[in-house]
Image (spheres, rainbow, N blue to C red):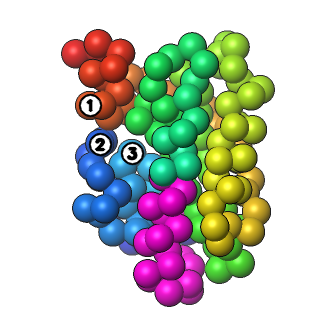
């Protein structure tokens, strides 16, 4: 992965306002040779899919919580997601990655999805978007 193809942007920036390789609080590996319009569509659709996955104990989606660390869209339309959990003791540790995989796999054009749970860096509340902070009353 080339560092010049991965960028961070402020939490909560709408996907429609950023380039393909800079979704909020996640890295998107921009090494695909797919047409830019297709990458943009897939990225927007993947983010929309991620926003349908809610932690059963927290009334906010995994994307706004900042649990998605990296999205890698390959030339073969294989999508690899690195995500974390709010805690290693999360009671939803088994089901959330499967829910993320199912949501991303349902996006038109995605061939296959692999989700890996990572712990480095550990998740902390600073990764949450303003929307998640508002829902959770964490100002």
Of 124 and 64, the residue lying toward us: 64
Q: Where does residue 36 sit, x and y in percent of width and height? A: 44, 82
The answer to whether residue 87 of the structure is visible from this angle is no
Say what secondary structure mark 3 lies in.
loop
| Marks 1 and 2 close (CB-CB < 8 Å) | yes
Q: Left or right of 135: which side holds 91? A: right
- Residue 15: quadrant of the picture: bottom left
* Residue 138 versus residue 16 in the image, above or below: above
- Report, in whole angstroms, how far the alpha carbon at label 2 lies from the one at label 3: 8 Å
**In percent of the image, x 65 and y 80: which residue is there?**
75
Tell me which numbered mark, 2 or 3, is placed earlier along the sequence. Answer: 2
- Residue 37: quadrant of the picture: bottom left
Residue 12's disc number: 2
Number of labelled discs? Answer: 3
Q: Where does residue 50 sit, x and y in percent of width and height? A: 54, 45
Label 1 crowd (10 A; few <14 / some 14-19 / many >=20): some
- Residue 74: quadrant of the picture: bottom right
**In percent of the image, x 62 and y 60: which residue is there?**
107
The answer to whether residue 69 of the structure is visible from this angle is yes
In the rendered image, the quadrant that contains the N terminus is bottom right
Q: Which residues are magenta?
A: 28-47
Tell me which numbered mark, 1 or 3, is placed earlier along the sequence. Answer: 3
* Residue 110 versus residue 61 in the image, above or below: below
Of 133 and 3, the residue lying toward us: 133
Q: Nearer the viewer, mark 1 or mark 3?
A: 1
Of 50 and 138, the residue lying toward us: 50
Dominant secondary structure of the residues highlighted in magenta in the image: helix
Tell me which numbered mark, 1 or 2, is placed earlier along the sequence. Answer: 2
């Amino acid at each position: 992965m080339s560092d010049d193809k991965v960028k961070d942007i402020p939490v909560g920036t709408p996907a429609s306002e950023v380039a393909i390789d800079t979704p909020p609080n996640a890295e998107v590996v921009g090494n695909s040779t797919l047409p830019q319009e297709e990458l943009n569509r897939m990225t927007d659709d993947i983010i929309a899919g991620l926003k349908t996955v809610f932690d059963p104990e927290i009334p906010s989606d995994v994307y706004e919580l900042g649990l998605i660390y990296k999205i890698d869209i390959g030339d073969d339309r294989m999508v690899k997601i690195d995500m974390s959990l709010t805690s290693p003791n999360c009671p939803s540790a088994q089901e959330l990655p499967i829910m993320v995989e199912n949501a991303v796999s349902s996006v038109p054009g995605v061939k296959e999805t692999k989700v890996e749970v990572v712990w480095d860096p550990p998740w902390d509340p600073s990764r949450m978007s303003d929307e998640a902070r508002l829902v959770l009353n964490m100002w």
